[in-house]
Image (cartoon, coloured by chain):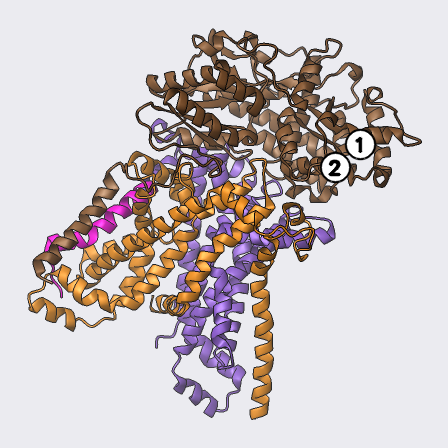
């Protein structure tokens, strides 16, 4: 149907739009405005132009370090998770026994919340490290790899499920045709399966990239940034800037805007990149 | 050929089996530690409880008392169930409306909502908590509005993807029969949406149930949800009780695991469907 | 279903949603049952008692959070006024106060930590000079003042030092080759060091895992070092300069007594229950438990820690064995140094709250320190040494560490190490100091890195505070 009386259109869309405006869009605009001001509560804001942005980078190295840490983390995680998930998906589409059970088990960690996840792995990692006389706060590297392991544990199952759906969506004829042409399993994988699951790759990459960049709960729980904020990712650094000290709210908001632009650019780039690789069915 | 395949399959099976055990082990380790006395956990998390270190259910009781876990559970449940309900109801309506009525406004609304998926929470966290406070949304009922606003992007995105592929004919027949849009939607379209509704419900339920920062900022000082209760134990208070922490971690996971195991078919199917169609 | 009915139901659903969004909800799911003290340790909200009014207090001290549940119940009974107490997690008071103050239902009673806290919150501090409680303050110079206004009333005098277990010390003194034969002989750093290191060598005989409890350096748990221990070198430096504390934070320091800090800090690290690389995960609670269970002989902390020691299941420490030793660092003349007694806990009342709420807050704090029930709580449960003349000499806390604080402060032969840390520039300074101490303990940074950070950050943070 192409026509709908106006009042119905409103009825269908207003609740969502109003909630969206109130909880997201207006705060978003307000956030942008506040990033150019010095404020404690919203009502006492004074315009200061770009100085918050400059301070975000110049006053201390925390923001820059968090950015580098986050980028490294995202790169490593995205690659590892997708490789892992895809490999598992390939294995689990081979009709061996217990496929369903395995799928259930691998997906399960995804259900567990970030905070809980962080503490579970903190216990385990400290338990291992104590044999070497250190703990996870000894070096930001431990925090880094701890987060990578955690992220893999949490996300692999989810991505695997998506890849499985993608692989199962490939029409068997294509695979048959390739096999008849003399391709072995490896070539079938490279030549048929991978190109045909590019849409799944797009989705999975998008999800892992955005989740990695936005990571907060797990970071807070696993290391809380120790030692001395060296293992803070961007979200945690911004949170600490905002709430950890007085007089820095404007800087915190500026950092948040930079964070947003950063994530937006990366995600859009990534979507562009992978969409171009997709083969329309 | 056959025996080679079988060998390959067996190796694969064994590999996956070991991997599965590894995957489950963190949870099992926490479970084991939840029965040990609080001073015997951090240094030796991999040790089995001995007669000396075993404390039975004591950690669970003290954990529940310390964090008010039962209330936290109540709040988490209330907020998750009603937020998911609100999201499913309103975003499906919106998605159907903007997908069926092709206009500039519809396109604008679509991108407007979807755009929010890229924005990190930190960008809006301060101003949103201020707004919530001013509008008196900083309580378990008001937070539902906030979740609807935040969940709108993803949910509309997923719903729209699905609705695009539903043929118009049935709806047109209903309109011609004299149904108004509300009836068309609820009587005809909504039932068809069931599979994707499950997806949306599950995706949102998982996120909201486990969410820490939003409830912490908005309602945290008065009402605790489960993630806040768990983090609370870590907040020190001069009493970081590892035993209680372990017990609370397990209690926090149990509801989700029960939910998952009973619905896992739908969950897994739903997640896949949502991603591929989107 | 008839079309009309359907339409109606849909409109109703939408209406319910809109109403829920707009209305200030009064029907909150009833889960805050008033009775059980066993529930939430943070909030003690009785069901919405709009009759008597409400006092919202943001509490700084986690150790006594539970006591407020009882106080609230008693206060409600006596006055019909609801006391709502929220306790901030260790190390997050400023942060929590900030986000709570931004809300429409902000705390009316809160705490500032001294002149620096006042500087940060002066727009929210009501002048208290005409309140009943202030009138009963024994030493008016203790209050936080500005001009002739009074903005912070101290609510507890506290002291900290090295808490030691006399039973273990006695055992040590009886050993052959002991470096001292009684606690009186340990009155400077050299002797302390000799004794401690000898005890470490003989720890098997003494049945301890280490002389000192873990030097807890977990984030938020490091205040014993970045604030309390750091107080000593700063105290001596400011004393040398005859610095007037009421001027607030000095714009810079040279940290000239850095080596003294290092003396004692290294002693703590090298003679501890836990290896120095594992301290990033240790909390104050862990340290107190180690002391309580007899695994260590000494732990640096304040008299508030008694309730933590007492509360450890299976504790082996006896009340009569728990005593204070001053923290010696190797400063000349320290034989006459006492423990460190002072206060950083000042009541402040929100000047932006309604006058009715302010009055309720004033009434509450006066009640706590003057009514029979209130005073009993202060002395027995909160364990505060109260600086008010409403307390007779017999109404002082009787726990062993409070008694020690009183013993030391009445000893006129010793000079007190005043709480100069109330003028440390900011929480960020303290947190970063703690962070670098952790890295020093782990061997990742040198002592020169530590001193550099202290001097540089003091300067930047002090400058920031005046922006």
Disc 2/disc 1 C-alpha distance (Å): 8 Å
Q: Is residue C140 left or right of residue B269?
A: right
| Residue at (42, 71) in percent of width and height | A198
Tell me the SS state at disc 1.
helix
Q: Is residue A24 magenta?
A: yes
Left or right of B196? Residue A37 is right
Q: Residue at x 30, y 50 (%)?
A: B148
Neighbour class for label 2 at 10 Å: few (<14), some, many (≥20)? many
Share a chain, discs 2 and 1?
A: yes
Give the main secondary structure of the magenta stretch: helix
Chain B drawn colour: orange
- Determine whether label 2 and label 1 are within 8 Å by CB: yes
Residue A77 visible (yes or no): yes
Q: Nearer the viewer, residue B159 or C73?
A: C73
Asked if residue C26 is positioned above or below residue A2 in the image, the reply reads: above
- Tell me which numbered mark, 2 or 1, is placed earlier along the sequence: 1
Quarter of the image for the N terminus of chain C: give it: bottom left
Give the percent coordinates (x, y) of residue C415.
72, 12
Q: Which residue is mark 2?
A: C294
The residue labelled by disc 1 is C168
Q: Which chain is brown?
A: C
The purple one among the chains is A
Chain bearing mark 2: C
Measuring from the top left, give residue A151's x and y in whole percent.
53, 58
Q: Quadrant of residue B164?
A: bottom left
């Amino acid at each position: 149907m192409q026509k709908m009386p106006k009042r119905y259109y409103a009825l269908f869309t207003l609740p969502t739009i109003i909630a969206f405006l109130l909880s997201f869009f207006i705060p978003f605009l307000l956030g942008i405005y506040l990033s150019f001001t010095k404020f404690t509560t919203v009502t006492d804001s004074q315009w200061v132009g770009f100085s918050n942005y400059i301070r975000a980078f110049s006053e201390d190295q925390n923001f820059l370090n968090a950015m580098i840490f986050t980028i490294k983390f995202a790169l490593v995680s995205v690659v590892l998770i997708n490789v892992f998930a895809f490999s598992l998906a390939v294995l689990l589409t081979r009709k061996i026994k217990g496929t369903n059970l395995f799928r259930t088990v691998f997906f399960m960690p995804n259900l567990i919340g970030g905070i809980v996840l962080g503490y579970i792995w903190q216990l385990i990692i400290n338990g291992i490290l104590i044999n070497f006389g250190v703990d996870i706060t000894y070096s930001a590297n431990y925090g880094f790899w701890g987060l990578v392991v955690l992220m893999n544990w949490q996300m692999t199952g989810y991505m695997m499920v998506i890849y499985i759906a993608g692989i199962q969506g490939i029409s068997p004829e294509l695979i048959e045709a390739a096999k008849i042409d003399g391709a072995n399993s490896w070539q079938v994988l490279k030549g048929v399966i991978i190109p045909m699951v590019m849409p799944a790759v797009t989705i999975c990459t998008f999800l892992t990239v955005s989740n990695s960049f936005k990571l907060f709960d797990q970071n807070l729980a696993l290391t809380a940034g120790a030692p001395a904020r060296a293992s803070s990712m961007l979200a945690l650094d911004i949170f600490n800037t905002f709430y950890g000290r007085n007089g820095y709210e404007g800087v915190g908001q500026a950092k948040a805007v930079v964070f947003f632009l950063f994530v937006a650019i990366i995600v859009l780039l990534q979507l562009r990149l992978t969409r171009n690789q997709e083969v329309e069915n | 050929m056959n025996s080679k395949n079988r060998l390959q399959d067996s190796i694969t099976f064994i590999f996956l089996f070991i991997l599965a055990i590894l995957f489950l082990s963190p949870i099992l380790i926490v479970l084991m530690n939840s029965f040990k006395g609080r001073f015997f956990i951090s240094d030796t998390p991999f040790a089995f409880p001995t007669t000396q270190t075993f404390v039975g259910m004591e950690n669970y009781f003290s954990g529940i008392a310390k964090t008010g876990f039962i209330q936290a559970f109540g709040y988490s449940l209330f907020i998750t169930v009603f937020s998911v309900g609100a999201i499913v109801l309103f975003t499906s309506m919106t998605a159907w409306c903007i997908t069926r009525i092709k206009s500039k406004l519809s396109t604008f609304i679509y991108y407007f909502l979807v755009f929010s998926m890229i924005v990190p929470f930190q960008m809006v966290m301060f101003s949103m908590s201020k707004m919530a406070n001013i509008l008196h949304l900083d309580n378990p009922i008001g937070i539902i509005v906030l979740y609807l606003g935040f969940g709108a992007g993803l949910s509309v995105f997923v719903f729209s993807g699905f609705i695009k592929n539903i043929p118009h004919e049935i709806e047109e027949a209903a309109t011609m029969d004299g149904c108004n849009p509300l009836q068309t939607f609820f009587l005809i379209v909504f039932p068809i949406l069931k599979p994707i509704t499950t997806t949306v419900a599950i995706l949102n339920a998982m996120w909201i149930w486990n969410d820490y920062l939003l409830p912490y900022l908005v309602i945290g000082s008065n009402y605790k949800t489960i993630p806040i209760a768990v983090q609370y134990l870590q907040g020190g208070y001069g009493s970081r009780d590892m035993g209680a922490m372990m017990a609370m971690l397990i209690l926090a996971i149990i509801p989700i695991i029960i939910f998952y195991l009973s619905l896992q078919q739908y969950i897994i199917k739903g997640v896949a469907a949502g991603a591929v169609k989107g | 279903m008839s079309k009309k009915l359907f339409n109606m139901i849909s409109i109703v659903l939408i209406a319910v949603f809109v109403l829920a969004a707009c209305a200030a909800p009064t029907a909150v799911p009833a889960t805050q049952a008033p009775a059980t003290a066993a529930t939430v340790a943070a909030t003690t909200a009785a069901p919405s008692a709009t009759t008597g009014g409400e006092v919202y207090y943001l509490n700084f001290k986690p150790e006594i959070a539970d006591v407020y549940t009882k106080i609230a119940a008693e206060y409600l009974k006596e006055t019909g006024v609801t006391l709502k107490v929220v306790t901030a997690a260790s190390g997050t008071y400023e942060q929590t106060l900030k986000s709570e103050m931004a809300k429409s239902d902000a705390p009316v009673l809160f705490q500032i930590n001294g002149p620096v806290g006042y500087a940060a919150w002066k727009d929210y501090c009501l002048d208290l000079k005409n309140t009943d409680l202030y009138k009963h303050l024994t030493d008016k110079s203790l209050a936080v003042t500005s001009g002739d206004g009074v903005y912070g009333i101290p609510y507890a005098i506290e002291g900290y030092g090295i808490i030691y277990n006399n039973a273990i010390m006695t055992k040590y003194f009886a050993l052959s080759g002991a470096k001292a034969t009684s606690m009186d002989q340990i009155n400077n750093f050299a002797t302390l060091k000799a004794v401690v290191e000898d005890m470490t060598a003989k720890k098997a005989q003494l049945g301890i895992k280490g002389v000192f409890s873990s030097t807890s350096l977990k984030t938020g748990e490091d205040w014993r070092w970045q604030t309390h221990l750091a107080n000593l070198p700063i105290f001596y430096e400011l004393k040398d300069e005859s610095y007037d504390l009421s001027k607030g934070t000095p714009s810079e320091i040279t940290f000239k007594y850095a080596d003294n800090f290092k003396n004692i800090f290294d002693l703590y690290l090298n003679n501890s229950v836990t290896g120095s690389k594992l301290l990033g995960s240790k909390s104050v609670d862990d340290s107190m438990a180690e002391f309580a269970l007899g695994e260590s002989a000494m732990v640096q902390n304040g008299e508030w820690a008694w309730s933590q020691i007492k509360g450890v299941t299976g504790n082996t420490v006896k009340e009569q064995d728990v005593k204070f030793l001053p923290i010696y660092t190797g400063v000349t003349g320290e034989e006459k140094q006492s423990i460190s007694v002072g206060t950083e806990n000042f009541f402040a009342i929100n000047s932006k709250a309604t006058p009715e709420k302010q009055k309720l807050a004033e009434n509450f704090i006066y009640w706590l320190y003057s009514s029979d029930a209130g005073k009993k709580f202060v002395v027995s449960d909160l364990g505060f040494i109260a600086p008010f003349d409403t307390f007779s000499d017999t109404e002082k806390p009787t726990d062993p560490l409070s008694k020690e604080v009183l013993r030391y402060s009445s000893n006129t032969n010793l000079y007190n190490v005043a709480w100069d840390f109330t003028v440390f520039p900011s929480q960020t300074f303290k947190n970063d100091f703690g962070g670098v101490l952790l890295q020093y303990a782990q061997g990742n940074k040198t002592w020169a890195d530590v001193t550099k950070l202290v001097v540089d950050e003091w300067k930047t943070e002090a400058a920031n505070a005046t922006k």
